[in-house]
Every structure is written in structure tokens, then in C-alpha cells.
Image (tube, rainbow, N blue to C red):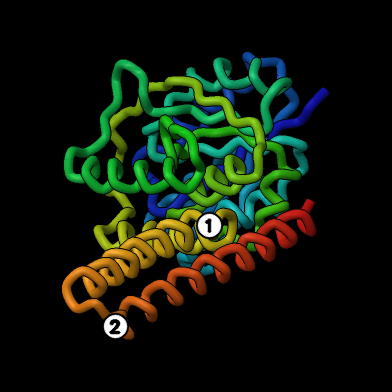
């Protein structure tokens, strides 16, 4: 029987963690699936660690200080015994009752994501504009529509997670990274609609994380699909070069240095993009 390792990062989650763990155990027991629950206490400053010590069915791992959401997940994944990794949060936002809806798809997919597109989704209005922009950018990189880029409730093969382990950041971008890495490398990803509840406790995300996501996407685009950057850039520079060239011929009956420079720059950018794409393709083959 396939074993699932449930990995949960926890940072100052004293308000919800005990209730979430009990509901999670009840749900996993009902699936008749072999499983383990790993909670990584990421340097919590409240009573999270004390509460966890009283929960006997949880395998506890501790960071001496706060390292970040992604760092906690990486610690849990490295220590996981299962062939499949399930991640969720300790703040009560993701409904444990949705987990049985994800499991039937494991036979045909490499990753199953609980997409927050259900009837009851409580995402703060202040986050929605940034979420929309990031989603559009991610769709462009992956070349497909992504219903939920960074859902924190998902199940994926441990082999898949380990293949891209060197790419995962320590912050909140773990889920975005594994999503883009999977889709850009032709893994099969299934999205199952789920609800999303209002969290208990204070959110750990900050406004500055938006810029971190953008930096991540540029890095991912260069790593997996550099032509998405270089070809449009070369096309824009080339069109400007041609326009300037035509302008010079029509109005001055001469060719200015700028038009030649722009056309040569467009060719150079295009060739660099092709070389980057070859390097990217070979690099990703090496990680298979």
C-alpha cells in the first residue's frame, strides 16, 4: 500500500494546531491509507511547541529559529518516509474533509492540488490584485491556465519534489515553484476544487512577498523557458529597428546607425535566447 507523509509547517499556530491535528488524524484514518503526520515547528514563539508535545500521533521536528514556510516544508520532506507527500497548513484554512477527494486521482497524476475555487473561499480582498497578477504571469510561463498557483493543500510524488529540491526557496514561494516546475516539465497535475476558510491567528505573509514572487517567476522563466523572455524582447527590438530603418529611408534617404544597432541587437538577443534554451533543456534532462 502506498504511504503518504503529511507535512505541515507550523509557526505560531497555538490557536488552531491541536484542533487541526485531531481533524486531520480522523480524516486520514477514514481513508484507510497508510500515513504519517510530520509537523515542523519553525521556531514558534508562542505555545505551539508545547501543544505539539502533547499530541502523541505526530512526528515532531523543530527549527531552533524561524526559517520560513519553504524551509519548514523542505525539512519535513527530507525526513518523510512516504512515496507521496501531502502538505497542508496548521491554521485551519484548508478543510481536511477535502482530502479524500484528492486521493482517487493519485493513480493517474504526479501532483493533485486542492484549488481554492470552491463555493466558500475566504481570500482577503487585499491579496486578490497581487494574486491575479501573479497568476497571469505564471500562466504565461507554464503555457497553460493554472486554477490555483500556490494552494497549500496538495499531494505530490516525493520523487518529483526531490528532483527540484535545489530550486525551492525558504519563503512562501515553495508551492508556486513546485507548480511551475511540474507544469514546465510535463508532469501531470490535477486540480480539485476545495473551499478555503478564514484563518485562525495572524497571517505570516507580508506585502514585500509580492516582489519575492516576481523575482521567483523571472528566475523560473530563465530556468525552464528562457525563450518566453528572449523571443518577445528580440521581436520588440527588431520591430523598432525595422521602423527606424524605414523612417530613415523615407525621410532622410540614408541609414542611421541606430537602426542598424537595433537590428543587430535583436539578432543577438534571439541567438542568446536559443543558447539559453539549449542549456535549459540539457540541464533539465540531467535532473531526470
Residue at the front extreme, as displayed: 253
* Residue nearest the observer in this picture, 236 or 77: 236
Estimate the spatial distance between the alpha carbons at disc 1 and disc 2, rounded to whole Å: 29 Å
Residue 188 at what x, y percent from top left?
64, 31
Work out whether 191 lies above or below 242. above
The residue at 54%/59% (across/down) is: 226
Residue 266 at what x, y percent from top left?
44, 69
Residue 255 at what x, y percent from top left?
31, 80
Left or right of 202 on screen, residue 75? right
* Residue nearest the observer in this picture, 21 or 100: 100
Whether tag 1 and tag 2 are in contact, CB under 8 A, the answer is: no
* Residue nearest the observer in this picture, 241 or 204: 241
Work out whether 134 lies above or below 234. above
The residue at 64%/67% (across/down) is: 275
Residue position for label 1: 227
SS class of the residue under badge 2? loop
Q: Residues within 10 Å of mark 1 (few under 14, many from 20)?
A: many
* Residue nearest the observer in this picture, 89 or 118: 118
Q: Quadrant of residue 90?
A: top left
Left or right of 100 on screen, residue 287? right
SS class of the residue under badge 1? helix
Residue position for label 2: 256
Q: Is residue 116 visible?
A: yes
The residue at 54%/22% (across/down) is: 99
Amino acid at each position: 500500500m502506498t504511504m503518504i507523509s503529511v507535512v505541515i509547517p507550523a509557526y505560531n499556530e497555538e490557536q488552531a494546531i491541536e484542533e487541526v491535528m485531531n481533524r486531520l488524524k480522523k480524516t486520514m484514518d477514514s481513508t484507510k491509507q497508510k500515513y504519517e503526520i510530520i509537523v515542523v515547528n519553525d521556531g514558534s514563539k508562542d505555545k505551539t511547541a508545547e501543544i505539539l508535545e502533547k499530541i502523541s500521533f505526530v512526528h515532531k521536528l523543530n527549527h531552533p529559529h524561524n526559517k520560513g514556510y519553504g524551509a519548514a516544508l523542505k525539512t519535513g520532506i527530507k525526513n518523510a518516509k512516504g512515496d507521496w507527500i501531502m502538505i497542508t497548513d496548521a491554521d485551519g484554512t484548508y478543510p481536511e474533509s477535502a482530502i479524500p477527494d484528492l486521493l482517487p486521482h493519485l493513480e493517474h497524476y504526479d501532483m493533485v492540488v486542492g484549488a481554492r475555487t470552491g463555493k466558500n473561499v475566504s481570500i482577503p480582498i487585499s491579496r486578490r490584485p497581487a494574486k491575479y497578477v501573479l497568476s497571469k504571469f505564471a500562466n504565461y510561463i507554464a503555457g497553460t491556465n493554472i486554477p490555483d498557483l500556490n494552494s497549500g493543500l496538495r499531494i505530490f510524488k516525493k520523487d518529483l519534489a526531490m528532483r527540484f529540491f535545489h530550486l525551492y526557496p525558504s519563503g512562501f514561494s515553495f508551492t508556486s515553484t513546485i507548480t511551475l516546475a511540474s507544469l514546465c516539465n510535463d508532469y501531470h497535475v490535477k486540480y480539485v476544487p476545495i473551499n478555503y476558510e478564514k484563518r485562525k491567528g495572524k497571517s505570516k505573509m507580508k506585502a514585500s512577498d509580492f516582489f519575492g514572487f516576481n523575482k521567483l517567476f523571472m528566475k523560473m522563466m530563465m530556468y525552464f523557458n528562457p525563450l518566453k523572455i528572449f523571443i518577445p524582447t528580440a521581436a520588440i527590438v527588431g520591430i523598432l529597428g525595422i521602423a527606424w530603418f524605414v523612417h530613415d529611408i523615407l525621410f532622410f534617404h540614408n541609414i542611421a546607425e541606430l537602426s542598424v544597432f537595433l537590428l543587430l541587437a535583436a539578432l543577438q538577443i534571439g541567438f542568446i535566447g536559443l543558447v539559453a534554451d539549449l542549456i535549459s533543456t540539457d540541464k533539465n534532462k540531467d535532473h531526470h
